[in-house]
Image: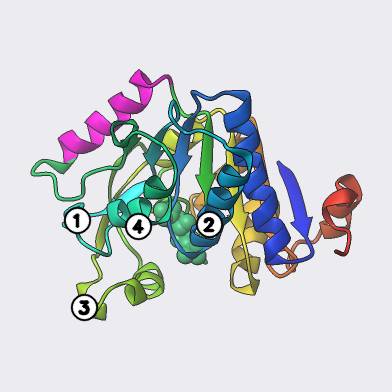
Amino acid sequence: MKILIFTNKTRAIARAAEMIAERIEANPRSVLGLATGGTMLDLYSALVELVRKRGLSFAQVSSFNLDEYVGLPPEHPASYHSYMRECLFSKVDIPPENTHLPHGDADDLYEEAAMYERLIVQSGGIDLQLLGIGQNGHIGFNEPSSSLASRTRVKTLTASTQAANAPYFERPDQMPKLALTMGVGTILDSRECLLVAIGSAKASAVAAMVEGPVTAACPASVLQFHQKATIILDQDAASDLKLRDYYQFVHPEECVEP
Ligand code: F6R
């Protein structure tokens, strides 16, 4: 794992956006695995700015999102389909047919999940998988106790995940209790992972992911088994790491004061 700790959120987000841009420059046909949530809002806005500044094209890029709520049609304002359209897809030149999210309103969710896995394989696999982390250590919506070999499937959201995401809905009781999510095994198959965590609320999950045992109790800890995982943190999210000085010693250029 490559642990990069930045003095503040702005610098951490800027580095993550830079990494994505670098990968697209190196391979314009990149297959991106995309995430949603509050952290990604900032990241996508930094990425869109960078794309404009550099004249970067997404014309040949394709994407697969991690998850979608069960029961929400793509046009629902709180769906991840809508989130992605608003935050990224409408702001870059990615062809809509190159973008993929699981359909949480499919009649047969088991077939939808199997088809999503097939589509990822047919695309050649994910080159760069973006990830956030839940306060309980989830990645995608793989909640604690998720099989570390799991594939795309329906998961029941924990009470803490429901509470964290309810503000995105008009009324808290509209918050879905189920999601269709790529599995931990699906995420592990990606060629590279980039996880971004900001703020002290993520500190204990980050410490469990990086320095704890690999366990289904913290699904993100499985990234210790990933061949190429970069973890981008601000100081607050890194605050519970025991070997923080060591990570900063290895990558000092990431930690200089602005
Ligand atoms: C959603 C997803 C989740 C979020 C995580 C952190 O697509 O993958 O795992 O990344 O819940 O969300 P924020 O950034 O809102 O704290």
Q: Earlier in the sequence, mark 1 or mark 3?
A: 1
Q: Badge 2 local density, few (<14 within 10 Å), some, or many (20+)?
A: some
In terms of secondary structure, where does tag 3 sit? helix
Which amino acid type is marked by label 1? Glu
Which amino acid type is marked by label 2? Ser
* 115 or 20: nearer the viewer: 20
Residue 193, position in %: x, y?
58, 39
In terms of secondary structure, where does tag 1 sit? loop
Q: Which residue is drawn at the image coordinates 52% and 28% (left, top)? A: 127
Q: Which mark is residue 83?
A: 4
* 125 or 208: nearer the viewer: 125
Residue 156, position in %: x, y?
28, 58
Residue at numbered disc 2: 45
Q: Earlier in the sequence, mark 3 or mark 2?
A: 2
Q: Which residues are magenta?
A: 110-124
Residue at numbered disc 3: 173
- Asked whether the residues under the numbered discs 3 and 4 touch, taking CB atoms below 8 Å apart as contact, a structural biologist would say no
Label 2, label 1: how far apart the Cα atoms are: 21 Å
Tell me if 216 is positioned left or right of 257 in this view.
left
Q: Earlier in the sequence, mark 1 or mark 4?
A: 1
Frontmost of labels 3 and 2 is 2
In terms of secondary structure, where does tag 2 sit? helix
Label 4, label 2: how far apart the Cα atoms are: 12 Å
Q: Which mark is residue 246?
A: none
Which amino acid type is marked by label 3? Asp
In terms of secondary structure, where does tag 4 sit? helix
Residue at numbered disc 1: 75
Image quarter where the N terminus lies is top right
Extreme left residue here?
Answer: 107
66 lies above or below 133: above
Which amino acid type is marked by label 4? Tyr
